[in-house]
Amino acid sequence: MDTIGDFLTRIRNAGMAKHESLDIVSSKLREGIAQVLHQSGYIRGFKVAKNKTRQLMRVYLRYNDSGDHIISKVKRVSKPGCRVYVKQDNIPEIRSGYGIVVMSTNKGVMNGKIAKQESVGGEVLCQVW
């Protein structure tokens, strides 16, 4: 099962349904993706709460002044059946810098621009714009 794809789909669907927040089971990779989305301004924030059996993450969505969801498109790049890795020189630029690429590197989950500055490559998880 593609847990990252499920996480991104839940964010997209909750935004289309105009929900203020969504709850999902937390993992370190999902927290890293949420942190990148928060730093880039695509979500308002997130909280991780520990339950007796598992950790839940609440993601607070962000909307513009007209009430539309900030995230217009999410594309999963690296899938469980076909992983996509890039070197630091080949990190893609999304929509001429308008969007972001979320990468998993050996220094953690980060934005593609930051990965380029840090001179690291890695797995391209998704594209957001």
Image (tube, rainbow, N blue to C red):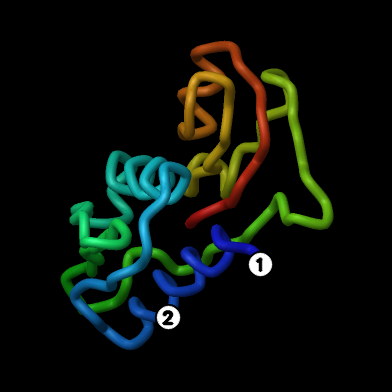
How dense is the environment of label 1, judged by Cα within 10 Å: few (below 14), some, or many (20 and up)? few
- Residue found at x 61% / y 16%: 120
Q: Callout 1, which amino acid? A: Met
Q: Which residue is mark 2?
A: 13
> Element at badge 2?
helix
Q: Residue at x 58, y 26 (%)?
A: 105
| Residue under the point 42% across and 50% down | 27
User: From the viewer's perspective, is residue 3 above or below residue 16?
Assistant: above
Q: Is residue 10 above or below residue 53?
A: below
> Picture coordinates of residue 117 (x, y %)?
50, 15
Please, what is the three-letter code of the amino acid marked with disc 2?
Asn
How many angstroms separate mark 1 from mark 2 (CA)?
A: 18 Å
> Residue 1, labelled with which disc?
1
* Horizontal and vertical percent position of residue 16: 37, 83
Between circles 1 and 2, the one closer to the viewer is 1
Q: How many marks?
A: 2
Question: Earlier along the polypeptide chain: callout 1 or callout 2?
Answer: 1
Residue 115 tag number:
none
Assign a secondary structure to mark 1: loop
| Residue 107: image location, x then y, percent | 50, 19
Q: From the viewer's side, name the closer residue of 2 and 54.
A: 54
Which residue is nearer to you in this view: 109 or 101? 109
Q: Quadrant of residue 86?
A: top right
